[in-house]
Structure formats: structure tokens, C-alpha cells
Amino acid sequence: MTEQEDEFFEGKRPWSIIKDEVLRSYLSPYMAKVNRLGQSIILVDGFAGPGVFDDGLDGSPLIICKAAEKFAAGKYKAFFINKKKKYHDKLESVLRKGGWLGAATPILGDTTEILPLLPNLLGNQTVFLYLDPFGPTGSPFSLLEPFLKRSKVHSTEIVVMMHMPIAHRLAARNAVESGKGDHPKIQKFHQAMSRIFGGDYWKPIMFSSDLTTEDRESQLISAYCDNLAAYLPYTGFCPVREGENDRVKYFFVFASRHPDAMLLMHDAMLKAYFKRIHEDAYEGTLFENIDWKDSLSKKGLKEAIVENVKIQPGITRKTLWINIVHRYFMKYQKSDFLLVVQQLVDSGELICPTPRKTKRLNESCELFLANE
Ligand SMILES: C[S@@+](CC[C@H](N)C(=O)[O-])C[C@H]1O[C@@H](n2cnc3c(N)ncnc32)[C@H](O)[C@@H]1O
């Protein structure tokens, strides 16, 4: 792994850019929001790396420190764990130069040993846990469980990078199909998969011969999110890849107790992913000046809105958007949602009796179907 590790930090890969862009654009509003809760904030980067890439771009520790300093200075403690001394030392010097040492602490050690100690030391702090290992075996479900099981009254967010090529290798579908599923090496791989995903629900998905690789991956990550949602109900994921036609490298997966965190993550992921995919597809062509937002479809949005209002008459526009994002994560953008709701009210298909100064709707407007 060492040579691969060094290569990783030589310069940002395009998929790494999506990943860091999501983290960056999520953390600023997240830090501003949790700062208002008034609890101290604990930020943990379990697989931190050296802090800067060789080409000078920020790694996750710096992205975290910059957002924390800007929006919650003096209110946070950040912990950056590295198993490799070389990266630990570099990170320490980068943190010192930035003036962050004190609020930020680099820790030399193995996250799989250090992280289980943390939940016992925690009280009512707000916790953000970021896990970006090289492969999924670095973040077994048992590592997350103590954080997932924190009391409901505390704010807890978990972000995990799920590496897909290694998950396919461990599932070894071709070996299973050719009757070698009982081979001890394959059995060991499968035990690793069950540890990563916290159960063996991955088997029918990964062994299915009716699904495309993409479908297998998104079903697997959806099922993983369902598993996380048993503890933290608002989950979502974003594929991280070089371009539209490239294989998924990672899924950026998150889980939170709060719907606002899901909304922030939805916006951050939608923008980082579709902007990158748009650039990859159209760079250097006549279409490069078209806004990436125009490539997003509104197909099915009107029906989803009407269906939701039918199920929950009197639902506010704010809750309606939470429901849409929860059900169709990363599919629709908020501006399109607002437009379609307004059009439905203007055309009389939806009714909004909430008193307001103009015809324009606001977040607390209650919505009903016209013919009910
Ligand atoms: C994918 S890189 C993380 C990159 C980082 N998030 C960034 O943006 O720069 C994974 C890092 O975790 C470290 N690592 C691997 N296994 C570890 C373990 N068990 N405990 C702590 N660190 C580990 C590696 O040395 C590497 O620096």
C-alpha cells in the first residue's frame, strides 16, 4: 500500500476533487449551524493524511480547520488520526504553520484502535466523524456503531467514503458464480464484507446476475444507508468518479439525526457532482458555457409533490422539500422545487390558505390538494 499511498498524495485526482468539494461546501454551513447549538464541537478525521497534497491543494484536515476557524473559532476541537508517521509529522507541521495546533490535535496511531475509546469520553458535544480510508475494510460497521448509538439529544454526523472497486473484489461474484464460494480465501473476503456493511444483506445484491455493476453498487449503498438510518435517520450518498462514463471510485455516504444536515449535504453533493460531470462532458466544446444546473431534470417532480401533499394535507413547503430530498436524494434542485410548487398553486392544482402579503409562497405555507 505504501507506494500507492504516496502516489495518492502526489496530486488531486478528479474524483478526489468532487469528494473535497462536497466536504468543503458542506462544512461551512454545518459549522455555522452547529455553533448555534451552544455545545462544544468535536471534529474527528480518522484517516487524515498529511493535510496538503504535493501540488499544494488542501487535504481534509485543512478543509476542516478552515471551516471550523471561520465559523466556530474557539468552540471546536479537531482530532486528526494517522497511522503513518510520515503523514502525521507533515500534518503536525502544517497545522503549526496555520496556527491551528491547540484547537487541532494530530494523533499518531491506528484509528481502528483509537476511535473505539472516544465515545466513552464524550458527553454532550456535537460530533462530526469523517472516515476516508483507502479501502472499505478501514471502516467496519462496528467502528461506527458507538457513534450511531449516541443519545438522540446530541448532534452526531457521520461521513464515510466507501471504496467500490475493493468491495467488488471482496464480494468475488465471479468466483461465487463458478462454484468457488466455499473456498477459504473467498469465505474470508465475505466475512470482511459483512464486517464492513454490518450484516450479510450485501450478498443477494452483489451476487445478482440480473443487475448491472452500477445498479449493484447503488443498491448496495442504499441498503447500507438503510442500515445507518436505523440509528441516524437522515442519510444519503453521492457517487465520486472522474466523469459520467467512468466507474464509481467511492460513494460519499453520510448519516445524520437532523433533516437540515441532509438538506445541506444534498445541496453540496448535487452541486459538486453535476458540476464536475458537466465539466468532464463539455469542457472544450460548444456547450461548456451552459450552466450545469440546466442539465438537471424536473421529470417526476410535479407528481412527487402532488403525491406528498395528498398523503399529508396541510404539509408546509419546508417539510415537503425535506420529504422530497429524503425520498429522491440528489435528484432535484431546490430552485426547481420552489418553481413547481408555485406553479401548482398559481394554476389552482394546489391550494395554500396560509395568509401572506403577496401570492408568493414561503417556507411555512401550508399546502392542500384543490379537489379534496
Ligand atoms: C485516503 S487517505 C486520506 C486522505 C485525506 N482524507 C485527505 O483528504 O487528504 C487515507 C489515510 O489514512 C491513513 N491510514 C490508513 N490506515 C489507517 C489506520 N488504520 N489508522 C489511521 N490512519 C490510517 C493513510 O496513511 C492515509 O494517510
Image (cartoon, rainbow, N blue to C red):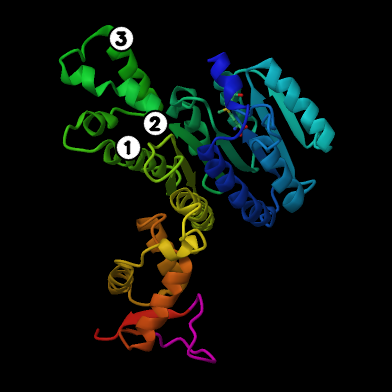
Up-down relation of residue 195 to residue 311 (above or below): above
User: Where is mark 2, residue-wise?
Assistant: 164
Residue at 32%, 37% in the rendered image:
217
Instruction: Give the alpha-carbon distance from disc 3 to disc 1, as whole Å.
Output: 23 Å
Front residue (pair 293, 125): 293
Label whose residue precedes the other's in the sequence (3 or 1): 3
Count residues near mark 3 (Cα–Cα under 10 Å), then give few for <14, some for 14-19, many for 20+.
few
Front residue (pair 4, 96): 4
* 362 is within the stretch colored magenta: yes
Instruction: Give the alpha-carbon distance from disc 3 to disc 2, as whole Å.
Output: 19 Å
Give the amino acid at mark 1. Answer: Glu
Q: Secondary structure at mark 2?
A: helix
**Mark 3 residue CB less than 8 A from any atom of ligand 1:** no
User: Could you tell me residue 24's position as x and y percent?
Assistant: 62, 47
Up-down relation of residue 314 to residue 353 (above or below): above
Does the residue at mark 1 contact the one at mark 2 (Cβ under 8 Å)? yes
User: Could you tell me residue 197's position as x and y percent?
Assistant: 37, 30
Front residue (pair 364, 282): 282
Residue 217 circle label: 1
Give the amino acid at mark 2. Answer: Met
Residue at 32%, 73% in the rendered image:
309
Does residue 149 show up?
Answer: no
Quadrant in the rendering for residue 316: bottom left
With 197 as the anchor, is 253 left or right in this view?
Answer: right
Does residue 183 show up?
Answer: yes
Instruction: Give the alpha-carbon distance from disc 1 to disc 2, as whole Å.
Output: 7 Å
- Ligand 1: which quarter? top right
**Mark 1 residue CB less than 8 A from any atom of ligand 1:** no
The magenta segment? 352-364
Residue at 30%, 74% in the rendered image:
306
Residue 185 circle label: 3
Q: Quadrant of the C terminus?
A: bottom left
